[in-house]
Every structure is written in C-alpha cells, then in structure tokens.
C-alpha cells in the first residue's frame, strides 16, 4: 500500500503565486492516479510563527480539504497533530475532540479514518 501525504502548507505560502497553484493541482492529479489505492495523512495545527498565522482547522480550510478528499477518494485518511515541540515556536496542537470531529466528516464521505491525537 502506498501512502501519499498532503502537505497543506502550500496554501499558506502565497495564494496569489500561480506556481504554487500548479504544484497543488499536479499533486492532486498524481494522487488521483492511484485510483483510491492510497492513504492520505494530514497534520492539523494552528498558531502564529514568524508573524504568519497558520490554521488549517477553520471551517473554510476543512471544507476545502474535504473537497480534495472527495476528489481523490483515498482508501483511508489519517488525521493527526504534532506530538513533540516543533522548531517553529507558536504552533499549538489540536485537541483530540476536534480531530475526531474532522474524522466524522470524512467518515460521512464513506472513507475510513484513523485519528492519532
């Protein structure tokens, strides 16, 4: 089984930069080429680091992510947050209850999930 990890950070780099959008589209097309025979791992976090707010748990972010999940149709989605301190100060872990809520939304799409708090 191949695992493919969505690195959702591209969204925060520069939404106006067309090269980032092309890379994201290519990534999605590459994942779709597996025809569902893949596991998507997604790290959720929030905070401010180097003056940049990072939060991929907002309603807008979760909705966009779920659209990608629906499009790719993976075998399973692994949902987690970081476990150890990061080198980027100011980031916070997402509580397990929030990760479980995200998981339930994925399950409603008919996709298996694994939550690792």
Image: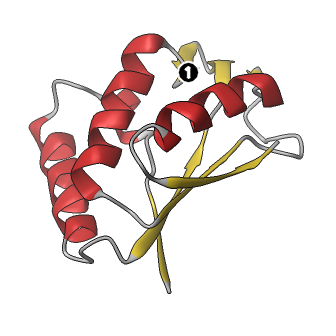
Please give the name of the residue rendered at 36% of the width and 23% of the height, measured from the top-left corner. Answer: 63
Q: Is mark 1 on a helix, strand or loop?
A: loop
Look at the picture and state if 35 lies above or below 77.
below
Q: Which of 69 and 83 is in front in this view?
A: 69
Residue 112 lies, in percent from the top left, at: 54, 56
Residue 26 lies, in percent from the top left, at: 16, 60
* Colour scheme shown: secondary structure
Residue 64 lies, in percent from the top left, at: 31, 28
Q: Which of 103 and 51 is in front in this view?
A: 103
Q: Nearer the viewer, residue 16 or 65?
A: 65
Reading the image, the residue beneath label 1 is 57
Q: Quadrant of residue 62?
A: top left
Look at the picture and state if 86 lies above or below 60.
below
User: What is the tally of numbered marks visible in this picture?
Assistant: 1
The C terminus: image quadrant: top right
Say if residue 95 shows up in the picture: no
Residue 70 lies, in percent from the top left, at: 28, 45
Look at the picture and state if 83 lies above or below 98.
below
User: Left of 30 or right of it: where is 42?
Assistant: right
Say if residue 28 shows up in the picture: yes
Q: Which of 38 and 85 is in front in this view?
A: 38
Near mark 1 (Cα within 10 A), the count class, few <14, some 14-19 or many ≥20, is some
Please give the name of the residue rendered at 44% of the width and 67% of the height, measured from the top-left corner. Answer: 75
Please give the name of the residue rendered at 16% of the width and 63% of the height, measured from the top-left corner. Answer: 29
Please give the name of the residue rendered at 39% of the width and 42% of the height, measured from the top-left corner. Answer: 109
Residue that sits furthest to the right in the current view: 84
Q: Quadrant of residue 13?
A: top left
User: Left of 29 or right of it: where is 87?
Assistant: right
């Amino acid at each position: 089984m191949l695992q493919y990890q969505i690195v959702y950070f591209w969204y925060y780099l520069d939404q106006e930069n067309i090269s980032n959008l092309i890379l994201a589209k290519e990534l999605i097309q590459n994942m779709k080429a597996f025809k569902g025979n893949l596991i998507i791992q997604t790290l959720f976090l929030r905070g401010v680091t180097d003056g940049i707010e990072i939060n991929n748990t907002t309603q807008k972010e979760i909705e966009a992510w779920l659209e990608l999940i629906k499009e790719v149709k993976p075998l399973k989605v692994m949902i987690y947050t970081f476990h150890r301190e990061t080198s980027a100060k100011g980031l916070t872990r997402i509580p397990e209850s929030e990760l479980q809520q995200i998981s339930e939304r994925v399950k409603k799409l008919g996709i298996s999930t694994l939550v690792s708090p």
